[in-house]
Amino acid sequence: MSSEPPRTGWRVKLGFTMFIASISWPVFIPFLPLLGVSGSKIATFTGAMVIVAEVLLLAGAAIAGKDGFAFIKSRVFGLLRSIGPPREVGPARYRFGLVLFIVPLALGWAGPYFGQHIPGFVVSPLAFAIVGDVMLLVSLMLLGGDFWDKLRSLFLRGAKAMFPGKTV
């Protein structure tokens, strides 16, 4: 496989634009009620949007072709790699990330049993759920790439734990 970046001709640019347009359509839905659009028209627009988005996605892929797919893949994964977690993190960051990882899991487990003893939990459980989800996502970014490998190993039957300093 060559290491040169994919070429970006007009077909690739058009395909990429169609791809972006197909995934950005839902941004307009929350603004429709603000513009006074009725519920039935919003439902009609949403249904049409789903169909048009799929057609745009397929047409964009067909127009862009193999070079376009390579271009989109390099752009998207390059962006994700640049903002993604580092491979290794320091001990303080790791401990803080573990706290952010464990607290929402513990709250999600204990909430139904002890929620009446947690201030504000019964009144607004959705706020607790949203904050917990954000904490979980932030923790995954803080814990680094090695933690992702640890999580992945939970689902691989043949994976073995290796502890530093322990000889086999």
Image: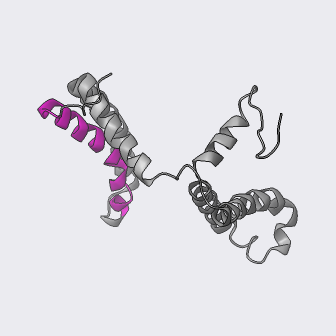
Residue at horizontal 38%, vertical 40%?
Answer: 47
Q: Quadrant of residue 21?
A: top left
Please tell me whether residue 48 belongs to the stretch shown in magenta.
Answer: no
Q: Quadrant of residue 36?
A: bottom left
| Residue 160 located left or right of residue 61 | right
Residue 96 in view of the camera: yes
Please tell me whether residue 30 belongs to the stretch shown in magenta.
Answer: yes
The one of 124 and 162 positioned closer to us in this rendering: 162
Above or below, comparing residue 155 to residue 84 in the picture:
above
Residue at horizontal 79%, vertical 46%?
Answer: 165
Above or below, comparing residue 118 to residue 63 in the picture:
below
| Residue 84 located left or right of residue 164 | left
| Residue 88 located left or right of residue 161 | left
Can you give x and y, in whole percent of width and height, for residue 111 in the image? 80, 62
> Does the magenta stretch mainly form a helix, a strand or a loop?
helix
Above or below, comparing residue 73 to residue 163 in the picture:
above
Can you give x and y, in whole percent of width and height, for residue 65 in the image? 24, 23
The one of 51 and 73 positioned closer to us in this rendering: 73
Above or below, comparing residue 163 to residue 36 in the picture:
above
Residue 53 in view of the camera: no
Protein image colouring: one colour
Can you give x and y, in whole percent of width and height, for residue 91 in the image? 68, 62
Residue farthest to the left? Answer: 10
Q: Quadrant of residue 83?
A: bottom left
Q: Quadrant of the N terminus?
A: top left
Residue at horizontal 73%, vertical 76%?
Answer: 120
Q: Quadrant of the C terminus?
A: top right
Can you give x and y, in whole percent of width and height, for residue 69 in the image? 30, 29
Provide the residue span drawn in magenta: 8-33
The one of 131 and 4 positioned closer to us in this rendering: 4
Residue at horizontal 76%, vertical 39%?
Answer: 162
